Amino acid sequence: MTETQPAPAGSADEPRFSLGTRAARNLATTTKSVPQMAGITPRWLLRRLPWERADAGTYRVNRRLTYQLGDGFVSFLNDGAAIRVVPPELAELPALRGFTDATLLDVVAGRFVQHEYEPGDTIAESGGPANAVHLIAHGKVEVTAPGEYGAAARVDILADGRFFGDRALLGDGAAWEQTFRALTPTTVLTLSPEAIEELTDAHDGLRAHLAQYRDAPVPPQTRHGEAAIDLYAGHDGEPILPGTFVDYEASPREYELSVTQTLLRVHSRVADLYNDPMNQIEQQLRLTIEEIRERQEHELINNRDFGLLHNADLRQRIQTRGGPPTPADMDELLARRRKTRFFLAHPKTIAAFGRECTRVGIYPGTVEVDGHHAQAWRGVPIHPCDKIPITPTGTSSILALRTGLDDQGVIGLRRTGIPNEAQPGLSVRFTGIDDRAIMSYLVSAYYSAAVLVPDALGVLENVEIAR
């Protein structure tokens, strides 16, 4: 039986825990540059985002009370080409919000029937009876309404996960006020009026819940869904003025600071012998911090808890009119908020927008930001950010941000003044030397982002850049 001999010290097969002397010598001889890194990007989001201190490690966003109408997204599962709705997701429909009977929701989900529509097909037409619930599993649906001068006016574009016709569950005999037409090949799950009648007749719990929802008083609210403040305007004489108060959310959103960390290891021999003319520890830390900042920007955009793509309000997510990002799409995104400070898009998305502008004979101008010339639309700079994902089908997103605490915008959060702080919100802490003579440094960055009011952040979704 042959025994495996341990690899000799310093051999290529021995696992390494720090920078080797051979690589370190490259900084100690000849005329040289500091170590370069191809992964460094402009990181415009980190540069343009106003940063606020979160001394307690948590930042609470207090808002005026807003009534949740349950206008969220519905999720689906697919077995091959067969698609079915996830039963608990039906609670996103306003009429079923708060309905907790999982068994009955499973029964309701099983009564939805899958339908396929080709581009141009009408799913529901204005004036017809609104007696069915439609869930959009995949595709884009154009919503139009009769215009003042006879032509149809485009109201909205709905995409994956959205729904319409949910009031059919209440059986109020309403008619469609809008026309819903497929723009792309679209898969829709439909709950027919016959199924709705059978379900409500057979299940007392469902019938009682829908009746309670139908009869519940609608609290006074603004067009933004916030609790109304009673006012009296345009009066004459001495009428009795209404009493009022501003109600707040009882459970406001709290943002906890996230952390990105790594343990940097440097062998003492490298630090002692190969530290001239460049400080090895300093260069190792510099590149490590650059990578942490890159990851920080990635998390601020993509993190499912606090990332901007996942925290945009549903009413601030819009769809492109035809796929590629057109000037009209950018205008609609811009018009959704006041004081838009900048757009954020993947470089390929910016190129796609430039192509669409050129195609219609429009040439966007530029603005100067921090000494750099940036492409702009309507005077608002469009900053590149390669952290915004591109799907395998060649679609991406464009973000529009209003920033700052005073403007109720998007703000960055960090904790400054922490021990061993090397940069704001980032610390480098020496953690000792192990029995291999390797020095360790704990590098930590603490950060998060908060959207103070919903219209501070908007997203143009499903932007086609591969055409």
Image: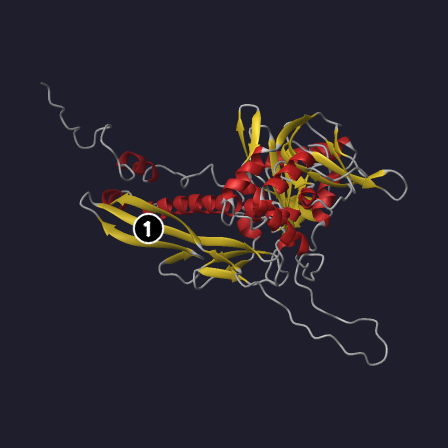
Q: Quadrant of residue 57?
A: bottom left
Residue 99 vs 240, above or below: the answer is above
> Residue 130 vs residue 138: left or right?
right
Q: Is 439 or 181 nearer to us in this picture?
A: 181
Percent across and percent down for residue 217 are 68, 59
Looking at the image, the residue that sits furthest to the left is 1
Q: Residues within 10 Å of mark 1 (few under 14, many from 20)?
A: some
Q: Is 188 or 27 nearer to us in this picture?
A: 188
Looking at the image, the residue that sits furthest to the right is 149
Task: For residue 372, say whether it is visible.
Answer: no
> Residue 58 vs residue 212: left or right?
left
The residue sitting at 67% across, 55% down in the picture is 215
Residue 351 vs 301, above or below: the answer is above
Q: Quadrant of residue 406?
A: bottom right
Percent across and percent down for residue 424 are 45, 57
Percent across and percent down for residue 227 are 66, 63
What amino acid type is highlighted by mark number 1? Leu
Residue 140 vs 448, above or below: the answer is above
Looking at the image, the residue that sits furthest to the bottom is 238
Q: Where, quadrant-wise, is the C terminus in this rendering?
A: top right
> Residue 46 vs residue 193: left or right?
left
Q: Is 214 or 148 nearer to us in this picture?
A: 214
Task: For residue 274, say whether it is visible.
Answer: yes
The residue sitting at 65% across, 51% down in the picture is 211
Local secondary structure at mark 1: strand
The residue sitting at 88% across, 44% down in the picture is 148
Percent across and percent down for residue 102 are 50, 43
Judging by the rendered image, the residue that carries numbered circle 1 is 442
